[in-house]
Image (cartoon, rainbow, N blue to C red):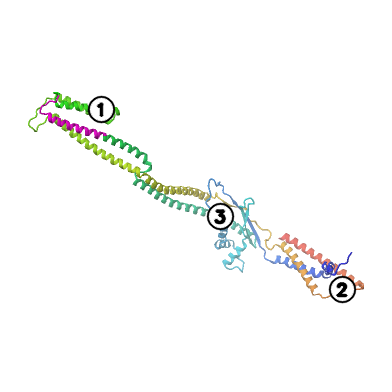
Amino acid sequence: MPELTEEQEIAQPDFDRYVDIVRRRHMYFLVPAFLGWLLVWGSSWILPTSYKSSTQILVEQPTMPENYVAPNVNENLQDRMQSITQQILSRTRLLIIINKLGLYANSDSLKTPDDKVDRMRKDIGPVELVRDTRNNEITAFKVSFSAHDPILAQKVTSELTQLFIDENNRVRQEQSQGTTHFIEQQLADAGVALAAQEAKVKQFQAMHEGALPSQQASNLQILAGLQGQLQNQQDALNTAKQQRVYFQTLIEQYKNLHASGRSVDGAPTEVTALDQELARLRAQLTDLSSRYTDSYPDVQKVKAQIAKTEKQKQDFLAAPRTASKGNDTESAPLLQLQSQLQANQVEIGSRERAIAGLEARINEYQGRLNSQPATEQQLAEISRGYEQSKANYDDLLKKKNQSVMATSMEQLQQGERFTILDPPSLPVRPDFPNRLKFCGLGIVAGLGLGCIVVFLIEFMDDRMHGEKELKELLPVKIMAEIPEIEHPGDKEKQRKRIALGWATAALMGAAIVVGSTVSYLRG
C-alpha cells in the first residue's frame, strides 16, 4: 500500500489521542457532568411549584336552522373571542375574582391591586383555539390558569370559564338588540321618507285630476259622448232655426191674408198654415226615421210636435172665428203662432248655450288628453321615487322582523353558545417546574460542563503525552525507538484509576436513573 503523506495524516482524526484523553481525564469529565446535572435537577425541587388547570369549551352551533332564523350578530368567532378575552382580562373583572378567591393574599411582593391584576394576567394561559381540519372553523377553545395550589387553580379556571360563557351570551344579546334597534331606526326614517313620497304623489294626482294616465280611457269615452251630444244639439239647433223661419213666414202670411180671411184655395188661412206645418213635420219625421230608430230623441220630439200641431188644427176647426176689433186686435191663431215663435226662440237660445257648454267641455277634455304625455312623464318620475322608497321600506320591514326573531332566539339562548366540554381539571402534577424535563436538561448541561472542563484542562496542560507530539517537536526523523518500561506499581495504579472511573460512572448513572424515576413519579 502506498504510504500516506504528512498532510493526509494530519487530516485524519486522531482517535488514539482521544482515547488517551478519555483515559487520562475521565474523572475531570465525570465529576463536573454529575455536578451540572445535580445542580439543574436539584433546582427543580427548589423552585416554587405551579399547577395548571385547564378546560375545553365547545362552540355549539345554533339549534335553529339559518334558513328559518338568520343570526343578526357578528359571525366572525375569532374577532368576537378577542373582544370577549379583552373584556374578561379587564381590571374590574379580574379584581372580582381576586377578591372572591383571595388570590395572592400571602404574597409580599404583590401589594397593590394593579400588581395582582398584572400577575393574574400572566398566570392566565393564552386561549387556544381548536379548528376543524376540513373547513378551518373554530369548534372549541381551551382556557387555563396556573397557581401554587391545584384546587385554587381549578376554582379560578372554573370562574374564567363561566365568565367566557356569560360574556359570550351578553355580547351576542347586546349585538342582536343593537342590530334590531338600528334597523328599527332605519325603518322609522324610511317610513317618514315613504310618507313624504306618498304625499307628493297624492298632491300631484289632486292637481292633475282628470288628466292622469289612468283616466285616459274614461276621458276618451267622455269626449266621444260629448261630441255626440254636440252633434245632436247642433242638429236640434238647425231644426229650431228652420222652425223659426217657418213660424216667421206663417206670421207674415197670416198678417198679409188676414183681411180676406181666406187663402188662395178658399180655405181658412190658419188651417192652410197648420197643414203646411204638418207636411213639413211629417217630411222631417220621414227623413229622421230613415236614419234613426223611433227611440231617438229628435224622432220623439218631431212626433210630439206633429201631435201638437194636429191638436191645434182640430181646436181651430172646432172653435168659432172671432173678428178682430180695431187695428190692435189679433185673432187667436196669430197669438198662438207668435207664442210658438217665442218658444222657438227660447229653445234656440237654450240650444246655443248648451252647444257653447259642450264645446267648452270638449276643449277641456281635449286639453287633458293633449297634456297627458307631459303629465305621465312627471307622474312617472314622482312614482319612481315612491316605488324606491316603498321597496326600501318593505326591505327594512322584512329585515326588522327577521332581526326581532333573531333577538328573541338569542334571548332564549337558542343561537350560537359556549358549553363546557371538559370541566376544569384538578392538576395532580405541577406544570412548573417539570422535573423530568429538568432532569434531561441537567444531563445535557452536565455533559457540556464536563466537556468544557476537560477541554480547558487539556488546553492549559503543556506536557507531552504521546509519541506523535514528540515527533512533531523534533526537526529530524526518528531512526529508532526505545520501548516503554512500565513499573508493576504503575500498572496497578492505572487499573485502580480505571476501576474508580467505572465505579464513579456507574454511581452517577444510578443516581441519574433514580432522579429521573422520582421526577417522573412526583412530576
Whether residue 103 is visible here, answered yes or no, is: no
Q: Which residue is label 2 attached to?
A: 471
Position of residue 317 measured from the top left corner of the image (x, y, whole percent)? 15, 24
Mark 1: few, some, or many residues within 10 Å (few <14, many ≥20)? Answer: many
What's under tag 2, amino acid-wise?
Answer: Lys
Q: CA distance from mark 2 to mark 3?
A: 82 Å
Q: Which residues are magenta?
A: 235-264
Residue wearing tag 1? 285
The image quarter containing residue 337 is top left
Q: Quadrant of residue 54?
A: bottom right
Does residue 276 appear to the left or right of 65 in the view shown? left
Q: Are marks 3 and 1 in contact (CB under 8 Å)?
A: no
Q: Of discs 2 and 3, which sits in the foreground?
A: 2
Which residue is tagged 3?
168
User: Is residue 239 rendered magenta in the image?
Assistant: yes
Quarter the C terminus occupies = bottom right
Q: Earlier in the sequence, mark 2 or mark 3?
A: 3
Which of the two residues, 212 or 492, is positioned nearer the viewer here?
212
User: Counting residues from the N terminus, which is met first, the one under dot 2 or under dot 1?
Assistant: 1
Q: Position of residue 111 (x, y in %)?
A: 59, 68
Instruction: Pick whichever of labels 3 and 1 is earlier in the sequence.
Output: 3
- Residue 299 locus on image (x, y percent): 26, 29
SS state under label 3:
helix
Q: What is the secondary structure assignment of the residue under circle 2?
A: helix
Who's the residue at 28% across and 40% down the image? 359
* Residue at the spot 26% in from the left edge and 38% down from the top edge: 355
**Quadrant in the picture for the N terminus:** bottom right
Question: What's the distance in space between the residues labelled 3 and 1, CA to CA?
Answer: 99 Å
